[in-house]
Image (cartoon, rainbow, N blue to C red):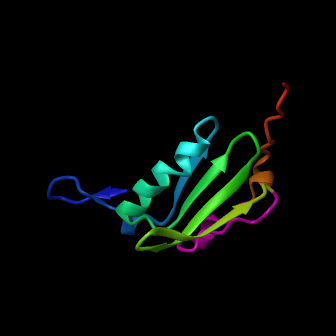
Amino acid sequence: MEADDAGGRWHGATVKLAIEVADGSVGYDTGRKISIYAAFGVREVWVVHAPTLVTRIFRRLGAEGYTLVTDHEASELLTPVLALELAVRLSDLGLLPIKDES
C-alpha cells in the first residue's frame, strides 16, 4: 500500500492486489485481517492456504466488506482483476501442498 505525503495514511484503492500466505493463521487472515483490508479499501485480496495451496479470493468491495469470495485449487488460473499480467497457476510454480503426517 502506498502512503500519502501528509502523514502516512494508507490508500488501499491504489493497491492492485494484496496476497497473504497463511499456514496456522488462515482463520485470522480470512477473518479479521480481511476486514482490515476492506476498511482500507483494498479491492482484491488473495489468501493462499500454504498446506493445501487453495487460494481464497476476496473481490467486489462493498459497504459490508467483500461480496464475492471464491476458493481456487492450485491448478486453476488465478487472474487479478486490476493486474491481468500477474495471472498465475500455483501448480506452474512448482509448489506442492504440504501433506499432513499426523
Q: Position of residue 25 (x, y in %)?
A: 58, 38
Decide: is 94 above or below 64: above
Decide: is 82 above or below 76: below
* Image quadrant where one finds the N terminus: bottom left
In this image, 83 relative to 71: left or right? left
Instruction: Residue 5: name its quadrant.
Output: bottom left
Q: Position of residue 53 (x, y in %)?
A: 74, 48
In this image, 6 relative to 9: left or right? left
Q: Which residue reaches farthest top?
A: 102
Residue toward you, 4 or 31: 31
Instruction: Name the residue at 65% across, 69% down.
Output: 79
In this image, 48 relative to 1: left or right? right
Instruction: Name the residue at 14% across, 58% down.
Output: 6
Whether 51 is among the magenta residues is no
What secondary structure is the stretch in magenta mostly built from?
loop
Instruction: Name the residue at 52% across, 51% down.
Output: 31
Span of residues in magenta: 75-88
